[in-house]
Amino acid sequence: MSDNVIDFHGITTVDELPELVLEKAKLWGMEHCVIIGHDGDGLLQFGSSTSSAKEILFLLERAKHFILTQFGETP
C-alpha cells in the first residue's frame, strides 16, 4: 500500500481491485464465506468455504438485504 493512501475499512462505493478485497477478507475472521464474481469474459466465477446450499443462499440473501438497506434501496 502506498504511503500516501489511507486504508478504509468501512462501507464504500469506491471500486477496488479483487486482489485487495480478498486480502482484506482474510482479516475478517469469517466462519463461512462465499466468493462470487465474473472474469474478463463475463463468465460467472463462484466459490464457497461450505458445501451447504442452505448456508450459501442464507449468506447471499443476508448480503442482498444489507446492500439494499445500506444504499437506500427497497427489495
Image (spheres, rainbow, N blue to C red):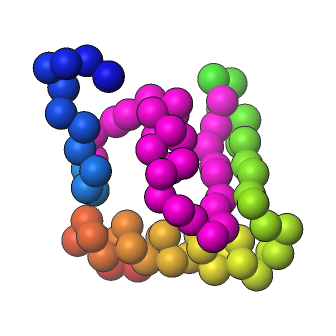
Point out residue 44 in the picture as x, y percentages from the top left corner. 71, 42
- Answer whether residue 24 is magenta in the image: yes
The percent position of residue 36, horizontal first and vertical second, equals 64, 50
Q: Residue at x 53, y 62 (%)?
A: 29
Magenta run includes residue 9: no
In the rendered image, which quarter contains the N terminus? top left
Give how far across and how far down residue 45 sits, in percent: 72, 42
Give the side of residue 10 with respect to residue 63, left or right: left
Q: Nearer the viewer, residue 39 or 54?
A: 54
Q: Nearer the viewer, residue 62 or 40?
A: 62
Using the image, determine if residue 51 lies above or below residue 4. below
Count of marks placed on residues:
0
Q: Residue at x 23, y 44 (%)?
A: 8
Residue at 65% x, 59% y is 34
Q: Tell me the magenta residue range.
A: 13-39
Left or right for 43, reference 28: right
Toward the viewer: 55 or 43?
Answer: 55
